[in-house]
Image (spheres, rainbow, N blue to C red):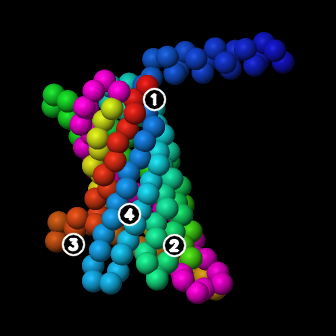
């Protein structure tokens, strides 16, 4: 048993020594009329090489007097371009979220696939600021509270319906 445990520790140390780990996240805020949306999304990830990485993002969204949503989103990151200190990337992942409407007894659940582009700018060797689009593409399977049918939504967030509220700003600390 000790040999197996020590082998696993050695493997983990080898993988993480060559990989860059980051923690951070983002926040988003949008106000349209009386509707106010606030999102906080901490995340942790690891660069596997110069182009690919993996990560896990958690999310909490509150739309005032409408609903509250919690989400988990593991993703694969592809760094498409690097210009000086700026890196352009695309996150593709799967997500699960649960949404509770104000005053409702039950929650709605959804899972699906999403694609989200972003830009990271390295201020120092350890600190980066990040801007990400919430989702450019979504394939969503959701079930409303109290409903027996599952809905399937395929969405493409085009420039025609893209707004500043679809952006999330944050930072990463790179170890």
Q: Earlier in the sequence, mark 4 or mark 1?
A: 1
Residue at the spot of label 3: 161
Q: Earlier in the sequence, mark 2 or mark 1?
A: 1
Could you tell which of marks 4 and 2 lies nearer the N-terminus?
2
Q: How far from the left and from the top, in percent, is residue 132?
A: 30, 51
Q: Is residue 45 above or below residue 61?
A: above
Residue behind mark 4: 138
Q: Label 4 to label 1, Cα distance in Å?
A: 27 Å
Mark whose residue sits in front, 2 or 3 = 2
* N-terminal label among 3 and 4: 4
Percent from the top left, x then y, of residue 110? 53, 68
Start and end of the magenta stretch? Answer: 101-126
Q: Report the Cα–Cα distance between label 3 and label 4.
A: 14 Å
Helix, strand or loop for the magenta stretch, by majority: strand
Evaluate if marks 1 and 3 touch, with contact meaning CB atoms under 8 Å apart: no
Instruction: Residue 134: name its quadrant.
Output: bottom left
Distance of label 2 from label 1 (alpha carbons):
30 Å
Q: Which residue is mark 1?
A: 21
Picture quadrant where residue 124 is located? top left
- Mark earlier in primary sequence (2, 3): 2
Query: How far apart are labels 1 and 3 at the CA level?
Result: 34 Å
Q: Earlier in the sequence, mark 1 or mark 3?
A: 1
Residue placed most toward the observer, 171 or 46: 171
Residue under numbered circle 2: 68
Q: Secondary structure at mark 4?
A: strand
SS label for mark 3: loop
In the picture, the disc for residue 108 is none
């Amino acid at each position: 048993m000790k040999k197996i445990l020590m082998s696993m520790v050695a493997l983990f140390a080898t993988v993480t020594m060559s990989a860059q780990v980051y923690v951070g996240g983002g926040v988003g805020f949008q106000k349209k009329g009386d509707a106010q949306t606030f999102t906080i999304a901490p995340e942790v990830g690891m660069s596997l090489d110069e182009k690919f990485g993996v990560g896990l993002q958690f999310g909490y969204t509150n739309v005032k007097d409408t609903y509250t949503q919690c989400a988990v989103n593991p993703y694969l990151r592809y760094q498409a371009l690097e210009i000086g200190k700026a890196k352009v990337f695309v996150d593709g992942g799967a997500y699960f979220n649960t949404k509770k409407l104000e005053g409702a007894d039950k929650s709605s659940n959804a899972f699906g696939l999403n694609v989200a582009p972003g830009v990271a700018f390295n201020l120092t060797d350890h600190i980066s600021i990040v801007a990400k689009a919430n989702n450019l593409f979504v394939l969503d399977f959701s079930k409303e509270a109290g409903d027996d049918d599952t809905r399937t939504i395929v969405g493409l967030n085009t420039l025609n319906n893209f707004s500043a509220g679809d952006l999330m700003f944050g930072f990463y600390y790179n170890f």
